[in-house]
Amino acid sequence: MVELEHSSPMIVANYWMARFIVAYTRRCILGTDSQIQLTEQSKLSIKIKEIMTSSDSLLEVEEMGIQNILHSVVAYRKSVMVRHKPIAQIFRRFLEDKCFPAFQAGSDPIVISLDKRGRLVHYNALHMILTWRDQLYQETTMSHDLIPSLEDELRERTLGANRVIDDIDTQIHDFASEVRKNINNWVKDMKDKMKNSFRSYNYTSEMEQILWDKESWSLKLVVSNIFNGLDKRIDDEEYIFLCGGNNNKQVQEVILKIQEVCSKLQMNRRILYIGRSEKTLFDDEVRRMCDYKFYKYIIIKEFWTRLQSIVSSRIQYLFKMRRDERKDEIMHGVKKLLAYEGEGSTVGVWALLSKGNRIIACDMGDKMLGVLNEYEKWKDSAQINGFERAFKDCYDMLNSSSPTSYQHSHCSLNYPSNLDKIPDTQSCPQCNHHMHKFVTFSCCHTFIDH
């Protein structure tokens, strides 16, 4: 890198260590073990070893191989690996002053982000990585090919030229091909310049803010691309029901009613069970009734971990933008889902309905079932105005007429202890009453020592 040629060995070492940590974290979190990523990780490992070998006096490294670097990373999935080895005092002070205030023993893992110049650009990029996943690595491509339009324009402007120029079509084709080649070369050159610039680093708090600026409460935000094939169903504007809860009978009752109503209207729909209950997830009857089946519980765990990261990241964003969290549609929607499936929750069933990417309603099973049971009253409206409008009108009417003393199943929200802006009070996303506040200590992982 041009920007690193005249940098101090300390900054160079920090940069390459950060590159390795990001590559390793992405592999742990996203489970992507492609040959390209493994090669990249191997190259980074070799580079770090070379720098440390040439900088022993500065870094005070004593036999610090790649395994010791891995021990400085808090593993995401099955273990937390923390190893304290002799490191340069400068680097140690940097970690303690800039990063450790966000990290506490026994708390959630963090991912420290340094840019290509070794500067701290995000003290914890983990929630950002989990929230947007592959979107941080996607390259922009042309939405359509300009060349056919160019060829048509050239033919129109040279109309009648074939009477005096026999090979006019060949010349038009060759000219358009040359234009395509020039466009591709220019785009490649721009991408190379972007990659070589220190400003191209994605894991910054500024990039996180840009990503949130264009987000809205939608099904794609909720499910991301964690479910194979679901994105196409969303783009095709199909009706999609997400269900959860820990009561098999109640879950089956809601799914059966959904199938019954959709069958009467002869409409396409997709049903998924994504609750945290392993018993319900792998129940034979529930699996038979759903359109998507999951064979590994880790997919469900990743789904709910990502939703928790959305809340953590969104809280920071709203605080920075000085916006009221209580009026934020994304926060309200995601908190609802997390409260339904929170530790100690007794919600038997809940459901979320969307048409394509647009979320129509999300509520506990009794309310969603109440709308479906009223089908005979709004079926004519469904024929005239469509299922989406009819369902939403009935749902809003039942909610407005429900008593203020509405009783619902116990639900709970959990916040990580190292989150900067944990609210002092929290309104229930379901009934808007103040929730009770508890401090919980839990141990659900093991430490691996070598």
Image (spheres, helix red, strand yellow):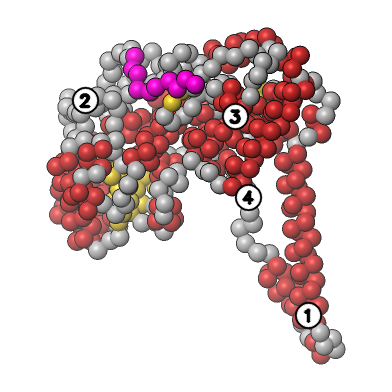
Dot in front, 4 or 3: 3
Residue 32 in the image, given as x and y percentages of width and height: 52, 43
The residue type indicated by label 1 comes to: Thr
The part of the image, by quadrant, that contains residue 382 is bottom left
Q: Earlier in the sequence, mark 3 or mark 2?
A: 3
Task: Measure the C-alpha gap from mark 4 to mark 2.
Answer: 45 Å
Q: Say the numbered circle drawn on residue 342.
A: none
Q: Which residue is mark 2?
A: 410
Q: Say the numbered circle drawn on residue 170.
A: 1
Tell me: residue 315, above or below residue 304: above
The residue type indicated by label 3 comes to: Ile
Q: What SS does tag 2 mark? A: loop
Q: What SS does tag 4 mark? A: loop
Q: Earlier in the sequence, mark 4 or mark 1?
A: 4
Q: Which residue is mark 4?
A: 140
Q: Is residue 446 magenta?
A: yes
The part of the image, by quadrant, that contains residue 57 is top right
The residue type indicated by label 4 comes to: Thr
Callout 2 touching callout 1 (CB < 8 Å): no
Residue stretch rendered in magenta on the structure: 441-450
